[in-house]
Amino acid sequence: MKIPNKIVFIVVDDLRHDAARILWPYFNIIFTQHHTSNNWTLPVMARILTGQLDTGLNYYKKMFSEEIAEVLKGGLKVPTIGKFLKDDGWITYSKNEGVFVGPVFGFGNPKEWDIWDSEHKGNGRNLYEPIFTHKKKEFRFYHDGYIHNYLEEGSKKTYKEMKTVSFGNTVAKNVRVYYAETLAEMEKWETDYWARAATLWSILDWVPKSDALVVLTSDHGEIFHEYYNDHTHAGSHMVDEIARVPLLIHWPGHERRRVSQFTRDIDVAPTLLDFAGVKQNHMDGVSLLPLIEGKKIYKSTLTDQYVHRSGELWKYFFSPTEKKLSFIKKL
Ligand SMILES: [Zn+2]
């Protein structure tokens, strides 16, 4: 396989799989059954960037952005793809609205790309075509809140700043909680969400023409009264609309493929490193490249435990032989 020298890795926060359906014609490798493991950003991003199950990460059993961010100030105890790539001579760059950016997570300094950044201000700017400024191998990681920010559209705030809030046995401080109190509010959210999702069609139209390898996924999906009468952003249960997310690859020159095997968030990191020609054997996830070529990759059933947003301990169960992935709440 010819190793690409430009890789763009995009995580569109909050993009459920059916909201990304409009983008399939832009990509030639499409995973139709890709799944994430949690209903909020930080734990999933850690899994995506390290290829590790929750039990191998240093925030395990921590909850809420604030606590995890505190733990992560010194970085993750296992290397991210940023570190692996940098050690292999790649210029690495990450842009993100929260943690997982910069040298402590193995990525380069965003200042190197100031020119590109200043030309693309506004919502969704991380999704526009990158201007590459180096001849060397470049890896870019953009975590973009364009879809997620539907929650802050218009004059009416759809979140409440809570001084303290309890979830299960845990009390969190200074949390922004998103929830719709009435059906009308929820329907406004729904309208704003799908309006933004539809514009991805024009924002990402550079992808099929790009010389770069482009990988697009999401950290979790979204629900709008599909099952419950309350509406909290990113839901309270690991239903299909939350757990199933896009995994789309633009692989220049490769023939078109659709892979309907179940795949997981922890497989993204080893796949990216495989594309970059970086060898490693430290990850729980496995590279999906052989799967694209029709080979088997999963050997055994895999389970993991993780803390859900509501403070509950959930069990993650993945069986390739049964083609089944489930999230079981541990009582
Ligand atoms: Zn998120």
Image (cartoon, rainbow, N blue to C red):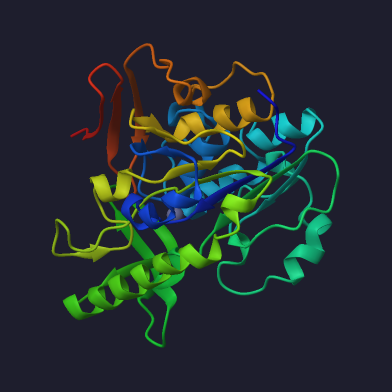
**x and y percent of residue 271 in the render?**
55, 29
Check the picture and name the quadrant holding the C terminus: top left
Of residues 194 and 70, which is closer to you in this image?
A: 194
| 279 to the left or right of 159 | right
Along the viewing direction, whichever of 71 and 194 lies nearer the viewer: 194
Instruction: Note whether 291 is above or below 67 in the view shown.
Output: above
Nearer to the camera, 252 or 270:
252
Q: Nearer the viewer, residue 271 or 207?
A: 207
Q: Quadrant of ligand 1?
A: bottom left
Quarter holding residue 177: bottom left
Residue at the (67%, 19%) spot, across then down: 279
State the image quarter where residue 291 is shown. top left
How many numbered marks have been drawn onto this rendered protein structure? Answer: 0
Residue 150 in the figure: left or right of residue 239: right
Q: Is residue 74 left or right of residue 111?
A: left
Q: Is residue 88 left or right of residue 19?
A: right
Q: Residue furthest top?
A: 299
Quadrant of the rendered structure where residue 195 is? bottom left
Q: Quadrant of the N terminus?
A: top right
Image location of residue 251, percent across then percent down = 58, 38
> Residue 222's spot in the image, x, y percent?
32, 57
Residue 306: % across, % down: 36, 34
Above or below 255: residue 175: below
Residue at x 31%, y 20% (from the top left corner): 320
Is 256 rendered above or below residue 303? below
Q: Is residue 64 visible?
A: no
